[in-house]
Image (spheres, helix red, strand yellow):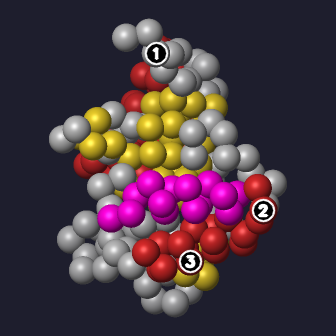
């Protein structure tokens, strides 16, 4: 298709598995390293996948979510939790601002949790996705030393964008 692959990010259940299980994370990291050492392995900030990637000698990027809720340990709430997905546009923007300006999220129990991240994830299926993504992108140069490039769009899902990270 003429596109250059620059990053690898496990998806769905595998994403959760590599975050919590060091053995599976190590297998994925070694596979990426064997395929192409220049690829960036993207995973949830502070998880086993990033540690495994570093041990495999590849570049890693911690991912923070602006439209998902976290527990007090800095882990994403499981989808089965009633508050796993943040639906309020204002709460999403508040979480994004907290991440961009202070490098932290406010967990569902009220704890402030620092996240070591290099990329931000937002679901494109949410209402006002483009407005939200643009708002977050505009926050970045004004609040911190992060850059808003590169901006990548993930694979199509039901003819809509599945996810974006920037």
Does the CB distance between marks 3 and 1 fall below 8 Å?
no
Q: Residue at x 40, y 67 (%)?
A: 68
* Cα gap from disc 1 to disc 2, whole angstroms: 31 Å
Quadrant position of residue 139: bottom right
Q: Which residues are magenta?
A: 127-140
Location of mark 3 (residue) = 94
Secondary structure under tag 2 reads helix
- Crowd rating for badge 3 (residues with CA inside 10 Å; few <14, some 14–19, many 20+): some
- Against 123, residue 93 (above or below) is below
Q: Residue at x 40, y 58 (%)?
A: 129
* Mark with earlier residue (1, 2): 1
Question: Is 121 on the left or on the right of 166, as rendered?
Answer: left
From the viewer's side, name the closer residue of 106 and 158: 158
* Cα gap from disc 2 to disc 3, whole angstroms: 15 Å
Asked whether residue 153 is drawn in magenta, I would say no
Residue 114, x across and y down, in percent: 65, 70
* Cα gap from disc 3 to disc 1, whole angstroms: 34 Å
Secondary structure under tag 1 reads loop
Does the CB distance between marks 1 and 2 fall below 8 Å?
no
Q: Residue at x 61, y 19 (%)?
A: 38
Location of the N terminus by quadrant is top left
Q: Residue at x 59, y 60 (%)?
A: 136
- Against 33, residue 123 (above or below) is below
Location of mark 2 (residue) = 142
The answer to whether residue 23 is seen in the rendering is no
| Residue occupying the far right of the picture | 145
Location of mark 1 (residue) = 3
* Mark with earlier residue (2, 3): 3
Question: Is 97 on the left or on the right of 76, as rendered?
Answer: right
Residue 118, x across and y down, in percent: 64, 49
Question: Is 66 on the left or on the right of 105, as rendered?
Answer: left
Asked whether residue 133 is drawn in magenta, I would say yes
């Amino acid at each position: 298709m003429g596109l250059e692959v620059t990053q690898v990010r496990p998806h769905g259940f595998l994403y959760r598995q590599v975050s919590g299980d060091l053995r599976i994370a190590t297998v994925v990291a070694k596979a990426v390293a064997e395929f192409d050492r220049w690829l960036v392995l993207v995973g949830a900030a502070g998880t086993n996948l990033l540690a495994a990637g570093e041990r495999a000698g590849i570049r890693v990027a911690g991912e923070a979510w602006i439209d998902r809720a976290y527990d007090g340990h800095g882990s994403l709430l499981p989808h089965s939790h009633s508050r796993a997905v943040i639906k309020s546009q204002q709460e999403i923007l508040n979480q994004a601002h907290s991440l961009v300006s202070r490098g932290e999220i406010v967990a569902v129990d009220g704890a402030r949790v620092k996240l070591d991240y290099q990329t931000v994830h937002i679901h494109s299926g949410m209402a006002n996705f483009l407005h939200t993504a643009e708002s977050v992108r505009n926050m970045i140069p004004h609040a911190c030393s992060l850059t808003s490039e590169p901006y990548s769009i993930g694979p199509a899902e039901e003819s809509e964008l599945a996810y974006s990270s920037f």
